[in-house]
Amino acid sequence: MKIGLLGHGVVGSGVTAITDSCAVKKVRRLEVSRILVKDEWEMTDPRCTTNVEDILSDPEIEIVAECMGGIEPAHTFVRRALESGKHVVTSNKKMFAAYCGELFELAKENGVSIRYEASCGGGIPWISNLTRIRRLEPVTSFRGIFNGTTNYILSRMARTGSDFAQNLAEAQKLGYAEKDPTDDIAGYDVRYKTAITAMKAFGAIVNAEEIPTLGIADVSADDIRWASENGYVLKLFGAGRNLDDGVSLWVMPVMTGDQQVFAHITDNFNAVESESPTLGPAMFVGQGAGSLPTAHAVVQDLLDIYQDQDAEAAYAERKTVNNDTVCARFYVRTAKPEAFADVCETGIGNGAFLTKELPLSELLAMMKGCGDEHVFAAMVME
Amino acid sequence: MKIGLLGHGVVGSGVTAITDSCAVKKVRRLEVSRILVKDEWEMTDPRCTTNVEDILSDPEIEIVAECMGGIEPAHTFVRRALESGKHVVTSNKKMFAAYCGELFELAKENGVSIRYEASCGGGIPWISNLTRIRRLEPVTSFRGIFNGTTNYILSRMARTGSDFAQNLAEAQKLGYAEKDPTDDIAGYDVRYKTAITAMKAFGAIVNAEEIPTLGIADVSADDIRWASENGYVLKLFGAGRNLDDGVSLWVMPVMTGDQQVFAHITDNFNAVESESPTLGPAMFVGQGAGSLPTAHAVVQDLLDIYQDQDAEAAYAERKTVNNDTVCARFYVRTAKPEAFADVCETGIGNGAFLTKELPLSELLAMMKGCGDEHVFAAMVME
């Protein structure tokens, strides 16, 4: 089965590394025949081309594996591949979170499938396990640590007591964080994965921008110290719950009780958990990023298509994000604590305090109106 | 597709609970048409029979789901089902660990499949994820907490400081431990699961009795206290590694470093981890037992057969257990410490000490020869 690979960066080069050298006969039959790169200087392999038509117009190529990242031109190329009757595998969470509804329709119209295991949790078999649970029962809720970069920074802050900027620089030096780290730090990466998980777990296609998203840009060494002195570990979570009307979805830092498994997921590891009626909680821990783990997920998707496994369930539908039922206590630190006087329960000092239990939407509204754009908030989860 | 269910106890009744009430159309097509029970008084359902011929000789029944437990008559019934051209799903680890090689052959000869997700890790999708990894690459090693009963007892001892006997009685009262708890306490249950995992992960059919197996019958409150005062949590592990010549497999208590995820798997939860070249470590955490989680795994196997998914790989072969490469430091407590003088590194008091690094086989030989049948040993895993 011939495969056209779009992009030969971290993930794409992992895909050729696996398919070119794998000892398993079935995997060797997945032949990457062309590779799209952007510039002439990237043409390090005889299969490389800078002309996407060499892939999209080649009738022998049955699957397009999109590992480019970014919205455009990835989105246009994926659309055209589906329209040409080619299956698509993508590792591109940003593009897929934005266009999954449209792309499913297009795949269905053209009798092909689109798969995206690598877009969500890297090497963790999250999407395939959600698919397996859902053939038997609905998924009730999910939550987890979906981003390795921020988990690395938070783990290191907890271990060393050093501050955010220093650890971000270290993560960039090690290649764990990108030069422009906004997507990771501001929680957008987790937002994309939360939207994609909602689609797989709940059959809910949402507008990702409706998901309230708080990142860790304003976390301080003091916040981390308070957490560890009070039996918590700070983690960045994405979470969701299936409701009768819509879905609840949010992304924000969480003060995780230090007896929880989540509190002990360190470095750049991810951990994600689903809950469903008969299976109960099921947690998956592994490498959420990296060349070979993510490429492993891409190749697993290619094998699913090769073996004609159950195609993507077509029962996803548009839903609105509704966090009315999300209530919790929160840790807040701000230069304007007076704006939170009504909900403050326990003062901590230096503008930090714990709130009484209140709806997430109420907290978000107060944060927006408080006049401090660097207010830091984390949900408390015992 | 008609299913004959053997046994209507904890797991079997969970299977009918799911298949009878599931809202998913595909699952409703899995019709449990007959249920074998042992005694007349168990015939609480019109489908019940005490005559196994009503199932084995019914040509309309295409799958036999064996949830009886125990070696016989389960083994004979499963053999006969396969010989009659029926697929088999089993949750019976004891029987399957003993006869998996023979039963695979029989299934192959008769063009049917035998599946066993529920036999190993209850609701955790361990077998299916190993299958998925193995279609792409070999599994290098595995390790984990495979038994909920002992994990419940060890967690409770750590939390309360109380002794083994008291917590075993509590576990029995709650239904977590059986009246005769030997299989759990002596590590035999983990041994069965370790043998089954070796088969799936490494394609190695072993004689389970070759797996060195130490349980927790002799653990004391002092051992647990020493662990927690020294940065460890005591857990019962099963583990294995794929070697060029044979496989390494062992079952024993482990002093787990308290920064490890395994240290925070509490109560009756299980956690199992595989390691493979491109995916790296992949951990699965969930309910390792219980009626509905285990029945969930049985029904997933039924769905795999119904959907004609990839059958069981037929490339398992006989291998010998070879633990020559397993070296570690050990915590030992014994009434005969003098027998261990050559390997003792750090004395702890009351007959307890830490050894220098040594091969597991050497430790086992010394334990056997030391003259203390209640010697307690745990591997140290930072």
Image: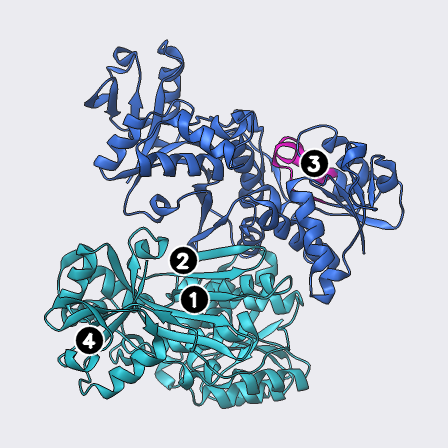
Chain colours: A blue, B cyan
Q: Residue furthest front?
A: B342
Q: Which mark is residue B121?
A: 1
Residue at the (47%, 26%) spot, across then down: A212
Could you tell me which chain the residue with mark 1 belongs to? B
Disc 2 packing (10 Å; few <14; some 14–19; many ≥20):
many
| Prevalent SS, magenta region | helix
Q: Earlier in the sequence, mark 2 or mark 1?
A: 1
Write down the residue under mark 2. Answer: B286
**Residues rendered magenta in the picture:** A89-105
| 3D distance between C-alphas at marks 4 and 1 | 24 Å
Mark 4 or mark 2, whichever is nearer to me: 4
Name the front one of labels 3 and 1: 3
Both labels 4 and 2 in a single chain:
yes
Residue A96 colored magenta? Answer: yes
First of labels 4, 1 by sequence position: 1
Callouts 2 and 1 close, C-beta under 8 Å: yes
Real-space Cα distance between discs 3 and 1? 38 Å
Question: Looking at the rendering, in which quadrant would you find the N terminus of chain B?
Answer: bottom right
Against B341, is B222 above or below? above
| Circles 4, 3 touching at the beta carbon (< 8 Å) | no
